[in-house]
Image (spheres, rainbow, N blue to C red):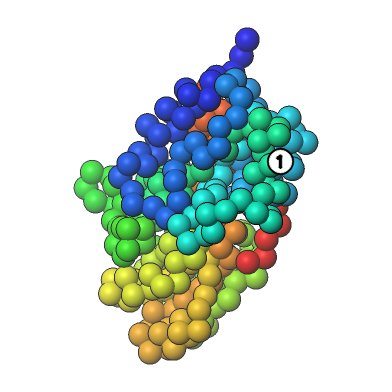
Amino acid sequence: MPGTTRQEMLSWLDATLQPDKFKDYAPNGLQVQGRAQIRKVITGVTASKALVDAAITHNADAILVHHGWFWGNESRTICGNRHARIKALLAADINLFAYHLPLDAHPVLGNNAQLAKLMGWQPQRHSDGSPVLCGPHDLVWLGQPSAPCTLAQLGQQLEHSLGRPSLVLGDATQSIQRLAWCTGGAQDFVQAAIDASVDCYITGEVSEPNLHLAQESGCSFISAGHHATERYGVQALGQALAQHFGIECSFVDLYNPA
Ligand SMILES: [Zn+2]
């Protein structure tokens, strides 16, 4: 019978993503235990109720996401929407695997690596090939755009590739030769980009101070969407998982403009 087991899938994911190296805000790995045999996996950015429902519709044995459950700042009770999500998952006997920072950081399959691949950006690398990293958790990548461009052109390239509007802060005519980026809600990591003297920092979300920092530091800022910038790591991980075990793995992209 084709497929793998919950335990084998967990061991492979842990060996690939090495979650023990990270101090994270939520548990990484198997968050909710389901059935022992795995033949079909659904991947998604966030384990919302809609994703759980999609996994049930697809007869999936496991869900694999970037944003799982049980965040450190959440209530520790199982009520309301948390109850609805957990009840549906347990009733369907589906496993929930989640990897947060380890999936942002992975040098090949991670969100930052995969966004660079999608955009044709050239990451700056050490002599051993590993990416040059900076900022909190070493999550900010440095590099160059696919070709020298203006800030306005870079914003348009992101809009085209991600299929959603980008918020661009800075001088539209500025020449962009060096970049820094970190997917998701990493607007507070912008200082690492300023310290690295890059021309533009790209992340998923924006806060009020980002405009002033962009104007005063000379480091432009693009907010390209939290969901949109974090769609690619879990897809790459899912493809690698499917290939390794010969199982079916499909990405479900649930629209999220944020
Ligand atoms: Zn995120």
Q: Quadrant of the C terminus?
A: bottom right
What is the secondary structure assignment of the residue under circle 1?
helix
**Can the viewer see residue 74?**
yes
Mark 1, residue position: 88
Q: Is residue 92 above or below residue 133?
A: above
The answer to whether the beta carbon of the residue marked 1 is less than 8 Å from any atom of ligand 1 is no
Q: Residue at x 66, y 30 (%)?
A: 93
Q: Position of residue 80 (x, y in %)?
A: 69, 56
Q: Would you identify the image quadrant in which residue 62 lies?
A: top right
The amino acid type found where label 1 is placed reads Ala
Q: Is residue 21 above or below residue 216?
A: above
Q: Position of residue 81 (x, y in %)?
A: 68, 55
Callout 1 crowding tier (Cα within 10 Å): few <14, some 14–19, many ≥20: some
From this viewpoint, which residue is outermost toward the right?
57
From this viewpoint, which residue is outermost toward the left?
127
Q: How many marks?
A: 1
Q: Is residue 258 left or right of residue 111?
A: right
Q: Is residue 227 left or right of residue 27?
A: right
Q: Quadrant of the N terminus?
A: top right
Q: Position of residue 161 (x, y in %)?
A: 61, 59
Q: Residue at x 42, y 64 (%)?
A: 181
**Can the viewer see residue 113?**
no
Q: Position of residue 57 (x, y in %)?
A: 78, 36
Q: Residue at x 39, y 79 (%)?
A: 219
Q: Is residue 244 above or below residue 203?
A: above
Looking at the picture, tell me which residue is in the foreground, 160 or 16.
Answer: 16
Q: Is residue 141 left or right of residue 252?
A: left
Looking at the picture, tell me which residue is in the foreground, 46 or 206.
Answer: 46
Q: Residue at x 30, y 45 (%)?
A: 21
Looking at the picture, tell me which residue is in the foreground, 35 or 258.
Answer: 35
